[in-house]
Amino acid sequence: MADYIEPTYAEVNKDVLRSMMETGPKYWALLGTSISVAGICFFIPWFYQLEVGIGASGMNRSAVWGTYLSNFIFWIGLSHSGTLLSAVLHITNSSWRKAIYRSAEAMTLFSLVTAALFVMVHPGRVWFVHWTVPIPNQMDLWPNFRSPLMFDVMAITTYLTASSIFIYMGSVPDFAAVRDASTGLRRKLYTIFSFGWRGTAKEWHTLGWAYTFFAVLVIPLAVSVHSIVSWDFAMSLVPGLHHTVFAPYFVTGAIFSGTAGIVTVMFLLRKYMNFERYIREIHLVNLGKLLVLLSLIWTYINIMELFTTWFSGSSYELEALEWRLTGFYAPMYWEMILFCAVVPMLILFKKIRTSWKSMLIISILINIGMLSERFIIVATSQPRKFLPDAFGFYFPSIVEIAITIGSFAVFSTLFLIFVKWVPAVSLYEVKETLKPLLRTS
Amino acid sequence: MSSVLDKFKKYTKPGYYDKFDYHWTMTIDLDRCTGCEACVVACQAENNLPIVGEQQFAMRREMKWIRIERYWEGEYPNIKLQFIPMLCQHCDQAPCEIACPVFATYHNQDGLNTQVYNRCIGTRTCAVYCPYEVRYFNWFTYHWDEPLEQQLNPDVTVREKGVMEKCTFCIQRIRQAKDAAKDDGRRRVRDGEITPACVQSCPAEAMVFGDRNDPDSQVSKMARNSRGYHVLEELNTKPSIVYLKRVQPDG
């Protein structure tokens, strides 16, 4: 990192705040496209489906779960790295985290919101979805606490709440910086957002203490969320889903796809918001190493899944496995193996690890692989369970495909709005990493 | 002291779980079943099942609370066709019941696995968890054309889109019989007073329905037959339907 000049404190403020205050036509064009794609591909098909019924999807009997659920897992998974990684790195005192954690946490938050939208798209009568929440009522009706779906509702709302508080708390000093640099309505707004932050020693102490407390709290929460999502599947009797390995499998997969997602978002922020001085090669290399590790764990768990299925000798399991490996969706399965187990090994080469473009391609391929993984889990297991007469087949309808595409637009819309409201790079934590000498220059 | 112990036992094992007021059971004699599908039609008429149309049928979205599964055995000249009527097994340890987040499906005092349409939010988890694939989802709100709505059974709800449904063992008939028994001053329903639509319509009398808690009922006698078995017994769902194996002349 020879050709890199450390910014001064004032430059940090200027660079990051500029990304919020100055809005070019490119940004508006991107935001407009995102909003219209989200509207056309996500909300209009969804409203159509609400009108006619879930029959608008390609689901049928014995394949009653489809892309809505697989996308839900994918988005929950993508949400995993942000807050989790940020918290782990905060506790282990890794200074390289400081430039990327804000956008990573934002990714968590907005993936969770997108996932929550899929919870709304999935059920047949979404207008009664609040019944899954334990609200005291005159009928004395409670949700079923034995149901893994119930755990899901609890886990996701808890995780969403904790991650929103975590990201907000970490942003308070930065909101104060925005307040100090702005005038008019924006200043008034950010005065409220920053809770009157003045930057006294006591405030910094409290913030540091509270932040570490939340970091410790969030880690087990993040692990539990995806374990619980996996139990939706693993607690059924369905061959191909009824595996004890599912909880670690889902958690690993989630962190894997989330880390790849961070690499993608980092590339875009660096390129389009001119954060070259803050998001540097060290971030790329460290995340690359993490990706290799996660890919190896993921591969190991996949091999174990195949092994335990074969070892069980159960004819149902073997039939499901055979269909997964050689049936209609086999090309997708092998594509997933290629993208998630083979391609990440390229990161072992230094040339690839240090190149932004190749890492961008690898990170996108990993997430395509993970999206297919979730689809395969849903589409190759429950249409073919026990009774051969009831064997079905699932292929998504146009409505489902549109909603899948639209979900990415929903996510990018939220993210684009976020970068104009919250400093996408943490000002005060970046300053902590600078050499003290520069304070005077 | 013993009363405290009893209370604790009752607490850890709620009464409805190991001892039912009734234990409605059905036996299906596969040796008698001809696969005529009269039961399917009777169920359709009794329980207001919609006709989904050709296109939806091709998409496997038909509604048949009872269906005849067909299994072919052997190669062409020596071919054999086996029928097995498949309907909700009303499992005592039903996988679907733990899955529902809102208790839309639960076990009632009669050992029935009931489905509360009003409570269902349509997550379809129960259908995924069900190993017998006997849960049917309302993909659309179905309509009955002009004169046909006159033949809807007034004792049974018409379901709307987004709701899961399945065989109820004709719970409306069970309820009527229990009410009649109460009006007569009897505590229990007599054997043979309740016949679900499928049992009633079976020309070969392959199906028998009754209370398994009564050891002298016809269904208890049938269930004790040495040919009796449960479908997918190894999953330990404890189904309430006993199938009687087909007698094969050549072993």
Image (cartoon, grey):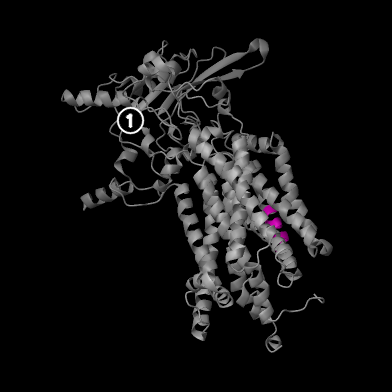
> In the image, A205: left or right of A356?
left
Q: Mark 1: few, some, or many residues within 10 Å (few <14, many ≥20)?
A: some
Residue A184 picture location, percent across and down:
53, 72
Residue drawn where x is 31% and y is 25% of the image = B172
Q: Which portion, as a residue range, is magenta?
A: A290-299
Q: Residue at x 60, y 64 (%)?
A: A420
In the rendered image, residue A116, in percent from the top left (x then y), is placed at: 52, 51
In the rendered view, tell whether residue A31 sits above or below residue B52.
below
| Of residues A53 and A334, the one drawn nearer to the viewer in this rendering | A53
Q: Position of residue B187 (x, y in %)?
A: 20, 28
Quarter-of-image position of residue B168: top left
Q: Quadrant of the N terminus of chain A?
A: bottom right
Q: Residue furthest left?
A: B185
The residue nearer to you, when weighing B11 against A401, is: A401
Residue B69 x, y percent position in the rendering? 53, 21
Magenta stretch prevailing secondary structure: helix
Is residue A291 one of those drawn in magenta? yes
- Output the chain of dot 1: B
Location of the C terminus of chain A (image quadrant)? bottom right
Comparing A159 with B107, the one in front is A159
Residue sitting farthest toward the right? A351
Instruction: Please indicate whether residue B71 sits to the left or right of residue A356 in the image.
Output: left
For disc 1, the marked residue is B23
Is residue A226 shown to the viewer in this render? no
The number of callouts visible is 1
The residue type indicated by label 1 comes to: His
Is residue A94 found inside the magenta-colored segment of the image? Answer: no
Residue situated furthest front in the rendering: A184
Q: Secondary structure at mark 1?
A: loop
In the rendered structure, the answer to whether residue A303 lies left or right of residue A227 reads right
